[in-house]
Amino acid sequence: QVQLVESGGGLVQAGGSLRLSCATSGFTFSNYGMAWFRQAPGKEHGFVAAINWSGGSTSYADSVKGRFTISRNNAKNTVYLQMNSLKPEDTAVYYCNAVRWEASAAAFASWGQGTQVTVSS
């Protein structure tokens, strides 16, 4: 079955950087666009960034454009999120999932455990 394992979160001061990783299995990774989502307490999963199957096309939420970079390694079945210039409002649990590009929405119903990112002011 689909497995999504996020890692790399932590506590960082505002202005700092983190690099998240998501190791996947159970599906043909190179056939899917992938995305990162985040969930703050009491809120739904919100779209952060997406990358198409080849890595040749990316999409970002306006709130992270210019600060975050999504990438992927199809040989390792892994997607990454480089987060720079972090702000307290970036605090959330971050998740990866396959993406329905036209809707910027998750393609799989199941989620991993996520990785907590906390940005202090």
Image: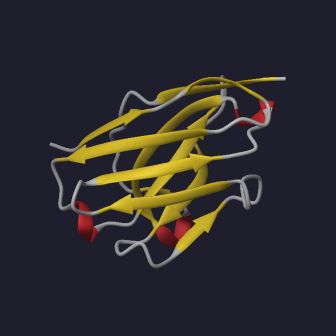
For this orientation, the residue located farthest to the right is 121
Give the image location of residue 55, x and y in percent. Answer: 42, 72
The quarter in which the C terminus is drawn is: top right
Q: How many marks?
A: 0
For this orientation, the residue located farthest to the bottom is 56
Task: State whether residue 120 is above or below residue 19.
Answer: above
* Residue sitting at x 63%, y 30%: 92
* Residue sitting at x 50%, y 77%: 57
* Residue sitting at x 74%, y 39%: 86
Direction from residue 89 to residue 91 in the image, left or right: left
Task: State whether residue 37 is above or below residue 72.
Answer: above
* Residue sitting at x 54%, y 66%: 103
Task: State whether residue 62 is above or below residue 112.
Answer: below
Res 12 quadrant in image? top right
Res 38 quadrant in image? top right
Give the image location of residue 49, x and y in percent. Answer: 57, 57
In front: 96, or 56? Answer: 56
Direction from residue 40 to residue 121 in the image, left or right: right
Direction from residue 119 to residue 74 in the image, left or right: left
Direction from residue 71 to residue 13 in the image, left or right: right
Task: State whether residue 88 is above or below residue 72.
Answer: above
The quarter in which the N terminus is drawn is: top left
For this orientation, the residue located farthest to the front is 16
